[in-house]
Image (cartoon, rainbow, N blue to C red):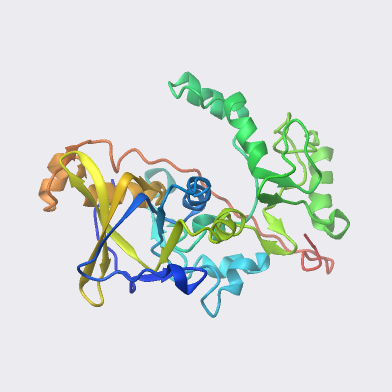
Amino acid sequence: MLHPVLRSSSAVRPLRRDSRCLIHFSATATTEYDYVIVGGGSAGCVLANRLTEDANNKVLLVETGPDDRKKWDSWKIHMPAALTYNLADYKYNWCYYTEPQRHLNGRVLPWPRGRVLGGSSSLNAMVYVRGHAYDYDDWQESGATGWSYADCLPYFRKAQNHELGPDEYRGGDGPLHVTRGNQKDQILFQKFIDAGMQAGYPFTDDMNGYQQEGFGWMDMTVWKGRRWSTASAYLRPAMTRLNLTVVTDTFVSKVVFEGKKAVGVEMEDRKKKTTAHVRAAKEVILSGGAINSPQLLMLSGVGDADHLTEVGVPVVQHLPAVGRNMEDHLDLYIQYMCKKPITLHNATW
């Protein structure tokens, strides 16, 4: 179960493309937007782009972590080979750990989550793999109408700009660049595929196409040798719009309710011990991810009433499932040593 524990934040600092649109929050200021998006990660960057396509929408995007370009070591985010550095850096990673896992001999495992513009798309291994078609069909069969694979596929294609061009499953003119790189440079990859075929597994030309089982080349969210996160693909183009404000290094401490209606958020500068309030005329959108969004709901009084009362959080709505029943898959790394001097260092995307 998640516990509503506050984490520290840096100063409230707006990030904008020119001085005309700078907004400085003070302890007493109350500013109103149409939409307030909490979390500038994989989904938040997309939402900021799509909502501001309508010039009548005034949108605020709030991110706890920093800009993905402004820190002295932010080059590590954009260099694909440096991805492991960020997984241990609290500047960019929440550095969560799981509870002891009963089926893993009681071990506690690291559970990285991005805290930077782009979120986990700025930290992950850049492998572009969609879920299996059956998974989406299972969603619909479980009651999520409109989330079958046939429903989702047009949006996968719309988002994608694959270097091999469009087909029935790939997109060719979306904002998200997807590449396979120069396969001639990737000797180890080819040997791995050859070994799979020798073992009797099928070759899969497109892991996101008709046949998803088998051995094949990975699609990567890498463009011209750099990571292509949702901050690069969606947020950066939208930041030229005057109806979007992006604020980084800002911790949202709770959602503000009037009765049962969410009307804004409270943001803290815990160093200066000041608080800023922002109202949302239309919607407050929680986009903090699978851990932080339910945590924020609980901090705001939405969750199991008994637990919230126990830790001193006033109850707004009793929803006992909030902060419970989280499941995630394991990621297993296998390392090996080559007898010949063959590496991936010369592999290019």
Of residues 331 and 270, the one nearer the viewer is 270
Residue 316 position (above or below residue 151) = below
* Residue at figure coordinates x 50%, y 53% from the top left: 45
Identify the residue at horizontal 83%, vertical 51% (top origin): 191
Q: Residue furthest right?
A: 184
Picture quadrant where residue 187 is located: bottom right
Residue 203: x %, y % from top left: 81, 36
Regarding residue 182, the answer to whether it shows in the image is yes
- Quadrant of the frame with the C terminus: bottom right
Residue 277 in percent (x, y) is at 24, 60
Residue lying farthest bottom? 72
Coordinates of residue 295 in the picture (x, y in percent): 29, 50
Front-lying residue, 176 or 90: 176
Which of the 4 image quarters holds residue 142?
A: top left
Q: Is residue 87 left or right of residue 260?
A: right
Residue 134 placed where, x, y %?
A: 59, 26
Q: Is residue 167 left or right of residue 51?
A: right
- Residue at left 84%, top 66%? 340
Left or right side of 288 for 314? left
Say whether residue 11 is left or right of residue 127: left
What residue lies at 27% left-to-right and 47% top-to-bottom?
297
Q: Would you say residue 123 is visible in this rendering?
A: no
- For the image, the number of numbered tags is 0
Quadrant placement of the N terminus = top left
In this view, the residue in front, 143 or 231, is 231
